[in-house]
Image: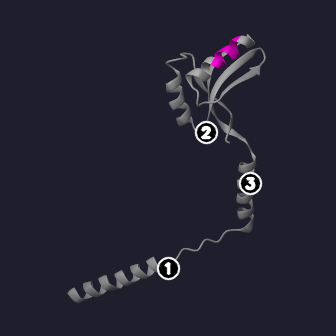
Amino acid sequence: MKIFLVSFSLSFVVLFSSAQQSGVTIHQEDKIAELMTAYKSFNKENEFREGYRIQVMFSNVRDEAYGAKAQLYKDFPKERCYVEYEQPYYKLRLGDMTTRLEATDMLNQVLPFYQGAFIVKDKVKTK
């Protein structure tokens, strides 16, 4: 019985070690490779993608929005600020975050200065 267990264990080890030495081969259609190449080149060429920004305020007075933008640059000098006009409001937005987690982190930094700030989906600059 011991001989049987020893021989069975040795054969299992030999099989397992030979399986580890063989490589994995991936067969992929040419169309998939072409699609991935097109996707990569599109992302390199495209300056914008879906992301998030922090909307700090909105107003129907243009000078008020641009005055708030100047103050926002003083409070957050490393972040980009944008004033977008959607009739009849000027919307002041901050940042170019690609994930909701980044936007939430930025929102937590902004809220002590601007209590009404909130996260919005927007096209953000990637470059």
Magenta-highlighted residues: 64-70
Based on the picture, tell me whether residue 69 belongs to the magenta stretch: yes
Specify which label sits upstream in the sequence, 1 or 3.
1
- Which-is-in-front pick, marks 1 and 3? 3
Which secondary structure class fits the magenta region best?
Answer: helix
Helix, strand or loop at mark 3: helix
Based on the picture, tell me whether residue 122 belongs to the magenta stretch: no
User: What residue sits right under mark 2 in the picture?
Assistant: 98
Does residue 127 lie above or below 19 as drawn? above
Q: Are marks 1 and 3 in contact (CB under 8 Å)?
A: no
Specify which label sits upstream in the sequence, 1 or 2.
1
Q: Amino acid at mark 1?
A: Ser
User: What residue sits right under mark 3 in the picture?
Assistant: 41
Residue at the location (67% across, 21% down)?
A: 92
Does residue 20 lie above or below 48 as drawn? below
Residue at the location (50% across, 25% down)?
A: 109
Q: Position of residue 127 (x, y in %)?
A: 68, 42
Residue 22 is tagged as 1
Q: Amino acid at mark 2?
A: Thr
Residue at the location (53% across, 16% down)?
A: 115
Looking at the rendered structure, the number of numbered marks drawn on it comes to 3
- Check disc 3: other Cα within 10 Å, few if <14, some if 14-19, many if 20+: few
Q: Quadrant of residue 119?
A: top right
Specify which label sits upstream in the sequence, 3 or 2.
3
Q: Quadrant of residue 1?
A: bottom left
Image check: 37 left or right of 98?
A: right
Q: Nearer the viewer, residue 59 or 10?
A: 59
Query: How far, Cα to Cα, is label 1 from label 3?
Result: 34 Å
Q: Position of residue 30 (x, y in %)?
A: 73, 68
